[in-house]
Amino acid sequence: MFRGIEVLQEKWVLHIVHALLDGPMGFNAIGREVGGCNPTTLAQRLARLEALGLVSKLEGAEGGTAANGNGRVTRACYSLTPSGRQLESVIVAIRRWSERHLDTTATP
């Protein structure tokens, strides 16, 4: 299997990338946008995407808040890297395909 498919098939990855196409977001904002992804899984997926060079995390930026070890609040913001942004065409292609070929009125 292609490595790219292995990455993209992980649950929530395409949802996270899709959310970040609108611009940088904090952790909690991504969680709200994605919906249904528990915080532990979201943190794992973001860390994986960051390790792969698809997402960058900027500490001290506007975004979600999290308490650090000394009780002060830090802000982290996640954004797509140029490599991650190139996935936009993949997401658009999936959206167009589903609009043409999937019956939106059918129930599972």
Image: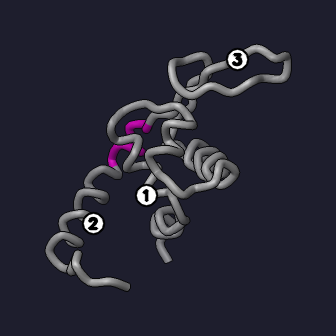
Residue 67 location (% of width, % of height):
74, 24
Q: Which residue lies furthest to the left in this view?
A: 100
User: Is residue 6 depicted above or below 52 in this figure?
Assistant: below
Neighbour tally class for label 2: few under 14, some 14-19, many 20 plus, Cα within 10 Å: few
Amino acid residing under circle 1: Leu
Task: Measure the alpha-carbon separation of dots 2 and 3.
Answer: 38 Å
What residue span does the magenta drawing correspond to? 80-86
* Residue named by callout 3: 73
x and y, in percent, of residue 66 in the image: 68, 27
- For the residues labelled 2 and 1, the Cα–Cα distance comes to 10 Å
Between label 2 and label 3, give the one nearer the viewer: 3
| 53 is higher (above) or lower (below) than 107 | above
On-image quarter of the C terminus = bottom left
Q: Which residue position is annotated with label 1?
A: 14
At horizontal 51% and vertical 33% (from top left) the residue drawn is 78
Q: Say which residue label 2 marks.
A: 94
Does dot 3 land on a helix, a strand or a loop?
strand
Q: Residue at x 63, y 54 (%)?
A: 38
Q: Residue 83 location, x and y as percent? A: 40, 43
Count of numbered badges drawn on the protein: 3
Question: Residue 51: which quarter of the image?
Answer: top right
Q: Nearer the viewer, residue 90 or 64?
A: 64
Position of residue 24 in the picture relative to residue 64 (left or right): left
How many residues crowd around disc 1 within 10 Å: few (fewer than 14), some, or many (20 or more)?
some
Of 27 and 59, nearer the camera is 27
Q: Farthest residue to the right: give it.
A: 70
**Mark 3 burial class by Cα count in 10 Å: few <14, some 14-19, many 20+:** few
Counting residues from the start of the chain, the first of labels 3 and 1 encountered is 1
Residue 81 part of the magenta-drawn span: yes
Residue toward you, 103 or 61: 103
Q: Nearer the viewer, mark 3 or mark 1?
A: 3
